[in-house]
Amino acid sequence: GNINLSRDTAYGVNPICTGPGQIVCSTTIPGSGGTEVHIYRSSPITLQGTPPASGWKFSHTSCCRAPGVVNLTNSGSSPFYFESVMYPGAASSSPKFAAHPNQILTNYNKTYNAGAISPNPDDSLHHVLVDVRVNATGLAGYSGGYSGVAPFPGPSTNPSNGAISIDGNTGLVSYDIQSAVNGSYAFAVEVEQWRNGIKVGRIYRDFMVSYSSSSSPNSVPSVAIDTSMHQ
């Protein structure tokens, strides 16, 4: 069946716009514009019965991505796809991805946070990089040198780049980009939710992230402790 959703909230999550090496919010150049978050909600729904062994699947698809995504072919006609699966024994909410999608890949930062969190402290979560999907069974096409487990510029696109990996426990994606094309890149993460040795849930989403070789490094913060108030 279908669940009707209405847009509840929309807001921007951009870093500071314009200036050397920063995002330009008024541009139409792929990979150079700002990012917005749109939250859709439904009315409360009560599910009857128990999920089968294959689980109850909840999914959403929307067309289409921006054209010109560097690591995908024909991205302008490629839909987004999101999925969550509830298995028997799931007595609480599924995990959710925690980070805002406003992180930028650079040649000096080496990690991207794609981690999920669970409302149940007894849960164990396992993160893996997977292929970007366009629907329940279809996969997006990758440009040469890229794949689900190597979605960013790596050794297969230029020998000067380091390997890409993901920490299964935290969802922290590590990379080492030294030579790459500026623009947008797509990658996907799947998270399994385990409780007492039983898989009770699974979530999947893909991310759109921009790479810029001209981004300026973050300034080191200045921190001081005032000890005059303490004896």
Image (tube, rainbow, N blue to C red):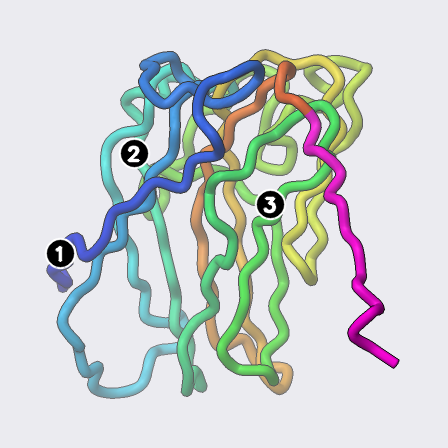
Question: What's the distance in space between the residues labelled 1 and 2, CA to CA?
Answer: 19 Å
Given the image, on which type of amino acid does mark 1 rest?
Answer: Ser
Q: Which residues are magenta?
A: 217-231
Label 3 or label 1, whichever lies nearer to me, is 1
Residue 33 placement (x, y as % from top left): 39, 22
Q: Quadrant of residue 199?
A: bottom right
Residue 226 placement (x, y as % from top left): 79, 63
Residue matched to label 1: 6
Name the element at disc 1: strand
Dot 3, how many residues are within 10 Å of its Cα: few (below 14), some (14-19), or many (20+)? many
Q: Earlier in the sequence, mark 3 or mark 1?
A: 1
Q: Earlier in the sequence, mark 1 or mark 2?
A: 1
Q: Is residue 195 above or below residue 20?
A: below
| Residue farthest toward the front in the current orientation of the protein | 228
Name the element at disc 2: loop
Residue 140 placement (x, y as % from top left): 42, 30
Residue matched to label 3: 129
Q: Quadrant of the C terminus?
A: bottom right
Q: Quadrant of residue 182?
A: top right
